Image (cartoon, helix red, strand yellow):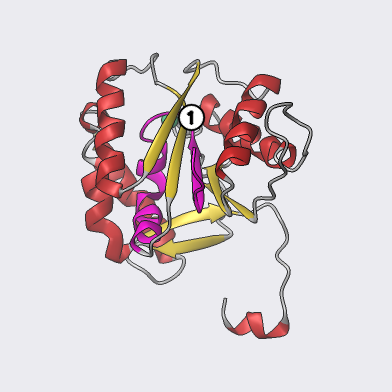
């Protein structure tokens, strides 16, 4: 497996695209090499078979210009444990990304937030631990390297927190929609009379409002930034 600038972890096919496909499209447009790592095949999904979901993942990845890798953990039963953390740490050591994305690991709100799926939260917890294990040289007998990820940015499924920052994705919206619409099985979902596309757009507009943009994608950062005084004029 070759090196990547960015590795984006997701619990299910579609988590990344529905949340941050605009940011990913912009990074790819700037020449960054992006790998998506999906923990499960969404085999317990209410909508769509595994074969359909895998075909959709392939099509969406092609639309965005990213590579992908699917791990074989159980949909609905993803847990942050030694096995999942080791799997993520191995990916990080093999691909050596500077930047990692993952779903945010904590949901303070109730169970009505359908985006705060158990697997999403666990995926964030897995990655948070794997970032530490990736630094340990002797963690794997057959892969004795240390890799320090520069920054992990958590994307917002769940949505109940205030983002640390928002990326303006207005000019990447067309590419984002192209990728999202590859998930045909999910486009048929219509909760409370609101389509999946409408839900995604509502979230983008909500985040966008925080920075005076039409469409935005929110992220949370756990670490404290190191800053020099001149940085304060660039943020
Ligand atoms: Zn999901």
Q: Point out residue 64 in the picture as x, y percentages from the top left corner.
A: 30, 48
Q: Is residue 17 magenta?
A: yes
Of the 4 image quadrants, the one containing the C terminus is: bottom right
Q: Does the residue labelled 1 lie within 8 Å of ligand 1?
A: yes
Q: Point out residue 199 in the picture as x, y percentages from the top left corner.
A: 32, 43
Which residue is more in the foreground, 110 or 183?
183
Image quadrant assignment for residue 82: top right
Q: Is residue 70 left or right of residue 135?
A: left
Span shown in magenta: 1-29
Q: Does the magenta stretch include residue 70?
A: no
Q: Is residue 74 visible?
A: yes
Q: In this view, does 146 lie to the left or right of 47?
A: right
Crowd class of label 1 (few under 14; some 14 to 19; many from 20; radius 10 Å): many
Name the residue at 68% across, 22% down.
81
Instruction: Say which element carries label 1.
Output: loop
Name the residue at 55% across, 43% down.
95
Name the residue at 23% across, 49% down.
177
Image quadrant assignment for residue 36: top left
Name the residue at 76% across, 31% down.
139
Decide: is 225 above or below 174: below
Decide: is 58 above or below 82: below
Which residue in the structure is indicated by mark 1? 11
Q: Point out residue 68 in the picture as x, y percentages from the top left corner.
A: 40, 36
Q: Can residue 105 be seen in this view?
A: no
């Amino acid at each position: 497996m070759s090196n990547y600038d960015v590795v984006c972890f997701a619990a299910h096919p579609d988590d990344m695209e529905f949340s941050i496909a605009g940011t990913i499209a912009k990074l790819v447009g700037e020449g960054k090499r992006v790998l998506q790592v999906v923990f499960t095949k969404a085999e317990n999904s209410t909508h769509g078979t595994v074969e359909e979901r895998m075909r959709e993942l392939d099509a969406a990845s092609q639309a965005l210009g990213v590579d992908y890798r699917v791990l074989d953990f159980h949909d609905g039963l993803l847990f942050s444990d030694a096995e999942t953390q080791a799997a993520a740490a191995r990916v990080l050591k093999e691909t050596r990304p500077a930047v990692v994305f993952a779903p945010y690991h904590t949901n303070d709100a109730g169970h009505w937030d359908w985006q705060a799926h158990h697997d999403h939260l666990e995926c964030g917890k897995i990655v948070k631990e794997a970032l530490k294990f990736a630094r340990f040289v002797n963690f794997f007998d057959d892969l004795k390297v240390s890799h320090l990820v520069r920054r992990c940015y958590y994307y917002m499924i769940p949505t109940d927190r205030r983002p640390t920052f928002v990326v303006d994705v207005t000019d990447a919206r067309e590419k984002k929609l192209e990728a999202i619409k590859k998930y045909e099985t999910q486009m048929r979902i219509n909760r409370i009379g609101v389509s999946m596309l409408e839900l995604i757009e509502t979230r983008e507009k909500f985040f966008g409002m925080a920075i005076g943009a039409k469409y935005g994608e929110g992220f949370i950062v756990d670490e404290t930034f190191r800053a020099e005084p001149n940085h304060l004029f660039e943020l």
